[in-house]
Amino acid sequence: MSSTKSESEREKIELISQPKNLDIAFEVYEKFSGILKELQEKFWIQIRGMIEEKRRESPAEFDGWSSPRPQGSISKNYFSVGLEPENPKAKEYCYLSFGQEKLENNNFRLRYGIFCNCNPIPEKARPRYEELRIHLEKHGFRKGEGFIGKKALDEDLYEILRALSRDDDTRLSSLVGELIDLFKDTRSKMDALNGAFA
């Protein structure tokens, strides 16, 4: 199956790279990259909008937490949205993060979890940090790259964008549901850890 797919891709590349087709190939590439960027922007705007909608629906559950402006750039290596404490008592804190990491093929891996902007963890906060880390680990989240625990999605960003281009936002709703469930499950432990940083 994979050999058939690679053979098909090779045939397409050979066809496109023929001198007589180069002008068309460059034109398609330029337009495609613009469309892709628009879809990417639409994806992240919708994700953040859905998170905000959940906050409006249940203000008590999200009291003291907000969805700040996205961090990073959609065309660069890193971009994320999430939920952060509105008035952290210290500059170090943990928060819910959902974002992208650029892959070698210019596609993006999507991952979410609980991120901590403090390294190393001070001794006074270590017990609360470990409590949250162990809890996340039991649910399949793995520590790494600033995350107390994170998961990568099975789909890459472009797979989800294909669905989004067909106005199918079912997967987006499912993703936001997973994020909100993680927030509710870890809220008390995040609050405890953030309090320990103060």
Image (tube, rainbow, N blue to C red):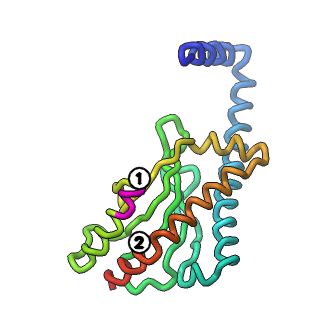
Residue extending farthest to the left is 123
Q: Is residue 133 magenta?
A: no
Residue at the location (68% across, 18% down)? 16
Residue, x 66% and y 17% (percent of image)? 12
Q: Give the residue number, with chain letter if any, for mark 1.
A: 140
Q: The disc labelled 1 sits on which kind of residue? A: Gly
Q: Residue type at mark 2?
A: Cys
The image quadrant that residue 191 belongs to is: bottom left
Q: Which residues are magenta?
A: 135-140
Q: Nearer the viewer, mark 2 or mark 1?
A: 1
Residue at the right extreme, as displayed: 167
When the figure is inspected, residue 84 is found, relative to residue 179, above or below; the finding is below
Looking at the image, which residue is at 49% across and 79% down? 85
113 horizontally vs 134: left or right: right
Q: Which is more toward the observer, 12 or 163?
A: 163
Task: Residue 186: give x, y in percent of width and height.
Answer: 45, 70
88 vs 11, nearest the viewer: 88
Residue at image mark 2 = 94
What residue sits 61% from the left and 61% below the top?
177
Judged from this view, the residue extending furthest toward the front is 138
Residue 116 coordinates in the image, percent (x, y): 38, 68
Whole-number angstrom distance, CA of label 2 to CA of label 1: 18 Å
